[in-house]
Amino acid sequence: MPELPPIDVAVVILLDGQRTLVNLRPEGSFYGGWWEWPGGKRNEGESLEQCARRELLEEIGLEAAELAEFARTEARFHDRLVNLVFFMGSVKPGSVAGAAALEHRWLTVPEVRELRFLEPNLPVLDLLEKAMNQARFA
């Protein structure tokens, strides 16, 4: 079977103090029942940051304040390479989760580690923990 073209995926790491927002992938979906940061596939003509903002709004109903690129990585899923671009930021003041939001939680990094968290996100979770620890002791 030939390999399909790579997919660009934007991911949003929202922070609130020492906590980050994670959501549960719906049962029946690809990797249903696994936890992840909000995000998804980039649409044609959309920048990665626009994609990150759209996915956050669609999945959780939240708007982000400023976002900054935090990390890039690649993951292979079956017959496809996925280019993951992680953005970090905070919730826009006054933004609240929508009634139709995916199940989500604000958790510390150690709490996230207790979940079934998508494996391609784990190296970025390590980077986040390191960055948070450095900021705490700076």
Image (cartoon, rainbow, N blue to C red):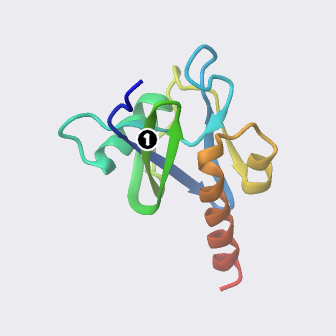
Q: Position of residue 4 (x, y in %)?
A: 35, 31
Q: Give the number of callouts.
A: 1
Q: Residue furthest front?
A: 1
Q: Nearer the viewer, residue 104 or 27?
A: 27
Q: Residue furthest left?
A: 45
* In-front residue for pair 17/78: 78
Identified at 44% across, 42% down, the residue is: 82
Which quadrant is the C terminus positioned in? bottom right
* Mark 1: few/some/many CA within 10 Å (<14, 14-19, 20+): some
| Residue furthest to the bottom | 138
Can you identify the residue that label 1 sits on? 81
Q: Residue at x 63, y 58 (%)?
A: 123
Q: Residue at x 53, y 22 (%)?
A: 99
Image coordinates of residue 85 in percent, x first then y, are 42, 52
Q: Quadrant of residue 56?
A: top left
Left or right: 58 as drawn, with respect to 25: left
Q: Which quadrant would the N terminus be assigned to in this image?
A: top left
Report the front residue among 101 and 49.
49
Judged from the image, the secondary structure of the residue bearing numbered disc 1 is strand
Asked if 16 appears above or below 12 in the picture, the reply is: below
Q: Disc 1 residue type?
A: Leu
Q: Is residue 40 above or below residue 17?
A: above
Place of residue 54 in the rendered image (x, y in percent of width and height, measured from the top left): 35, 37
Q: Is residue 21 left or right of residue 75?
A: right
For image coordinates 59% across by 58% down, the residue present is: 124
Which residue is situated farthest in the top direction here? 28
Q: Residue 120 appears at what percent x and percent y? A: 59, 47
